[in-house]
Image: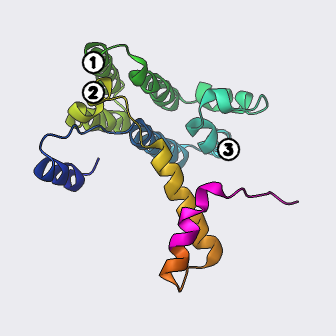
Amino acid sequence: MSAAYWSAVLEHLPDAALVFDKFHIIKLMNERLDDLRRHMVREAEGAMKLKIKGTRFLLLRNPENLRQDQIPKLDRALKLNEPLLLGWYLKEELRELWNQPSRKDMEAFMKDWCEKAEQSAIGQMMKMAKTLRIHASGILAYARHPITSGKLEGINNKIKTLTKRSYGFHDENFFILKLLSLHHSKYKLLG
C-alpha cells in the first residue's frame, strides 16, 4: 500500500487493476489497535494496568481462534476500557468489508465504517479511516478482482524460514534447487 509501489505500478502498468490485499489492511488495523492498547496501558494505573497488559494477542487474534480460557480475559479487558472496546469492535466489523456482495455495497460499508471510526474520536481509528479513504480505489477493486496474495505471503515465509534455518547459502545454484523443492518439503515436528 506504499505510495512508491502504487505509483510504480500505475506508471509501468497503466491498464493493471491495483488491488490492495485484505491481509495488509487488516494487518494495518491490528497495528492501530495495538497502538491504542499500548497508549491505554501507559495511561492506566494499578489493577487497571494489569488487566489491559498482556491482552495484545487476544485483541489481535480472530475471535473464532481464541481458546475458551482466553475469552474471559479478553472480556474483562474490554469491559474496563471503552476506547479499547470500540477499537476492537471496529476491527471485527472491518473484517466484513470483503464479504459484501458488490462494489457498491463495499463502498457503502466502507463509508459507514469510516464515519463510525471518526465518531469514535479515537485517534488511531480516525487515522485508519483516513488511510482507508486514501486507498479506497485499491480496496474496492477487490469487488471486481477478488484476489489475494495469501499464497505468495506463505511462500515468502517458507523462503525466509529456509534461509534462516540454513544460515544462508554460499552456492546460489544450490539455493535455487532448495527453493524449487521447497513446496515438496514436509517438516516433521520433534519433541
- The location of residue 34, given as percent across then percent down, is 49, 44
Q: Quadrant where the C terminus lies?
A: bottom right
Residue 127 against residue 71 in the figure, above or below? below
Question: Which numbered disc flags the more N-terminal residue, 2 or 3?
Answer: 3
Apparent side of residue 9 relative to residue 163 in the rendered image (left or right)? left
- The location of residue 11, given as percent across then percent down, is 11, 51
Disc 2 marks a residue whose amino acid type is Leu
- Magenta highlight on residue 187: yes
- The location of residue 120, given as percent across then percent down, is 36, 25
- Magenta highlight on residue 2: no
Disc 3 marks a residue whose amino acid type is Leu
Residue 186 against residue 38 in the figure, above or below? below
Count of picture labels: 3
Disc 1 marks a residue whose amino acid type is Arg
Circle 1 sits in a helix, a strand or a loop, which is it?
Answer: helix
Residue holding disc 3: 50
The magenta span reads 176-191
Classify residue 31 by image quadrant: top left
Question: Which numbered disc flags the more N-terminal residue, 1 or 3?
Answer: 3
Residue holding disc 1: 103
Confirm whether residue 74 shows in the render. Answer: no
Question: Which numbered disc flags the more N-terminal residue, 1 or 2?
Answer: 1
Residue 88 against residue 176 in the figure, above or below? above
Residue under the point 60% across and 64% down = 161
Q: Which mark is residue 140?
A: 2
Confirm whether residue 165 shows in the render. Answer: yes
Residue 127 against residue 12 in the figure, above or below? above
Q: Are marks 1 and 2 in contact (CB under 8 Å)?
A: yes
Apparent side of residue 153 relative to residue 5 in the rendered image (left or right)? right
